[in-house]
Image: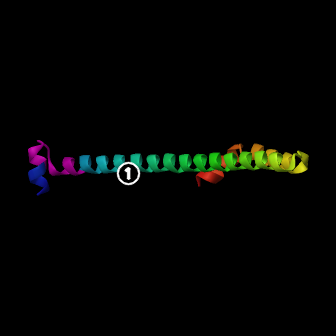
């Protein structure tokens, strides 16, 4: 069967198997790279929603309590720490 298909393309069976193997390997590499990008984007999206929730909480707290205080300073420090590369690596895994 492989010899027949290879003859249609004008090559030997060994060459045909090598070409098909190379194409399959290339497809596997592309799918792996694509999945890594998708995982990284999912982590970035999750961080963005967490930050939005934190900002909403800060605004709610300011509206209800009308106090700044140390609690807000702690939340801002937590947001700054979440912008580091370590947070990106942690979320993309």
Q: Along the line of sight, which residue is nearer the eye, 31 or 64?
A: 64
In the drawing, does residue 8 fall left or right of residue 27? Answer: left
Please tell me in which quadrant of the rendered image residue 59 appears.
Answer: top right
Q: Residue at x 61, y 50 (%)?
A: 46
Disc 1: which residue: 28
Q: Residue at x 44, y 46 (%)?
A: 34
Q: Position of residue 51 (x, y in %)?
A: 69, 46
> Residue furthest toward the bottom?
1
Q: Position of residue 72 (x, y in %)?
A: 84, 47
Predominant SS along the magenta part: helix
Disc 1 crowd rating (10 Å Cα; few below 14, some 14-19, many 20+) is few
Residue 58 appears in view = yes
In the drawing, does residue 79 fall left or right of residue 20? Answer: right
Q: Position of residue 14 (x, y in %)?
A: 19, 51
Q: Along the line of sight, which residue is nearer the eye, 67 or 9?
A: 67
**Colour mode?**
rainbow
Q: Quadrant of the C terminus?
A: bottom right
Residue 77 appears in view = no
Q: Residue at x 13, y 48 (%)?
A: 6
Q: Along the line of sight, which residue is nearer the eye, 46 or 8?
A: 46
Q: How many marks?
A: 1
In the drawing, does residue 54 fall left or right of residue 29? Answer: right
Q: Residue at x 63, y 48 (%)?
A: 49
In magenta stretch: residue 34: no
In magenta stretch: residue 12: yes
Write down the region rendered in magenta.
6-17
Secondary element at image label 1: helix
Q: Quadrant of the N terminus?
A: bottom left
Q: Along the line of sight, which residue is nearer the eye, 61 or 89?
A: 61
Q: Position of residue 82 (x, y in %)?
A: 72, 47
């Amino acid at each position: 069967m492989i010899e027949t298909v290879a003859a249609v393309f004008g090559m030997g069976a060994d060459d045909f198997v090598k070409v098909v193997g190379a194409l399959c390997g290339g497809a596997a590499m592309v799918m792996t790279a694509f999945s890594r990008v998708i995982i990284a984007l999912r982590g970035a999206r999750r961080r963005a929603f967490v930050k939005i929730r934190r900002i909403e909480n800060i605004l709610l707290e300011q509206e209800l309590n009308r106090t700044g205080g140390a609690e807000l300073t702690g939340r801002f420090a937590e947001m700054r720490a979440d912008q580091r590369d370590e947070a990106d690596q942690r979320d993309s895994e």
